[in-house]
Image (tube, helix red, strand yellow):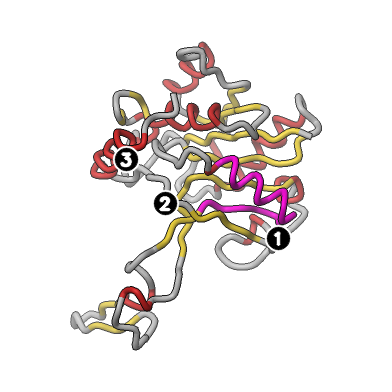
Amino acid sequence: AMIIGLVVARRSSKGFVGKNIAKVAGKECWKHTLAAARFATSLNKVVISTDEPSITGSASTGLQGLLFDRVIARPAELCKDDSHIMDAVQHAHQECVKEWPDICAMVLLYANVPYRPRDIIDACVKKLQQSRADSCFSLTSTGKHCPEWMFELDSDSRLKPVYPSGTYRRQDLPARYIHDGGAVVMSRDVLEGKVRGTGLYARFGHRLVGVVSKGAIEVDAEEDIALAEWRIARMGEMS
């Protein structure tokens, strides 16, 4: 049974145009994701699904010995602003099984994440295998940015607590987590659309598990680049 690392890199981005090819610590964002995928010991193959011409050309010829095992051209209908990521994932899976029919799981890796904890991909794969869940998400703590301390603002600028709470001290806040974009491992049943949960992550199945780390850094704005470069300088590259 094979586990495939799937890098996804959609060209169009309304928030930060060109984020997947933005330079971070001297190289384009997607190359950091490729390096992380190659660093992981649990992945048998690494492929990319993209409509970005500059990535397609580089990925096909190889960079510094780091080659994708396959470059999948993402169809235009899966590259719209309202396209669901699972449509791109399932399209990539359908293409991959033609060559590797014994795929048991795929690891979703966003190209605009230049920093991931070194072991997060392997840790998420291991958790999925041990738990037999439908999907496993990398998570990071929300810290003080949790619903108990958040407000909504009405038209008169009056504050309304999102989640009323009497918790005053940060140390007493309940543990809350958010998906950080580092990795999502999906079982074969999820890839084939055989299971479905509820809510925001319904298409990832009904039994979801997570692995908590200090957090990946996702580039969705220019200021995120500085944070990613600081973390890479501190923790080191996977090159």
**Magenta region's main secondary structure?**
helix
Secondary structure type for disc 2:
loop
Between disc 1 and disc 2, whose residue precedes?
A: 1
Quick check: 196 left or right of 31? right
Determine which residue is flagged by label 2.
214
Secondary structure type for disc 3:
helix
195 falls in the magenta region: no
Instruction: Name the amino acid, label 3.
Output: Arg
- Whether the residues at callouts 1 and 2 have beta carbons within 8 Å, the answer is no
Which residue is rendered at x = 32% and y = 31% of the image?
22
Secondary structure type for disc 1:
loop
Instruction: Name the amino acid, label 1.
Output: Arg
127 falls in the magenta region: yes
Magenta residues span 121-138
Instruction: Name the amino acid, label 2.
Output: Lys
Does residue 103 lie above or below 160 as drawn?
above
Judging depth in this view, the residue of 11 and 68 nearest the camera is 68
- Image quadrant in which the N terminus is located: top right
Determine which residue is flagged by label 1.
196
Q: Which-is-in-front pick, marks 1 and 3?
A: 3
User: Residue 169 location, x and y as percent?
Assistant: 30, 79
User: Residue 165 location, x and y as percent?
Assistant: 37, 86
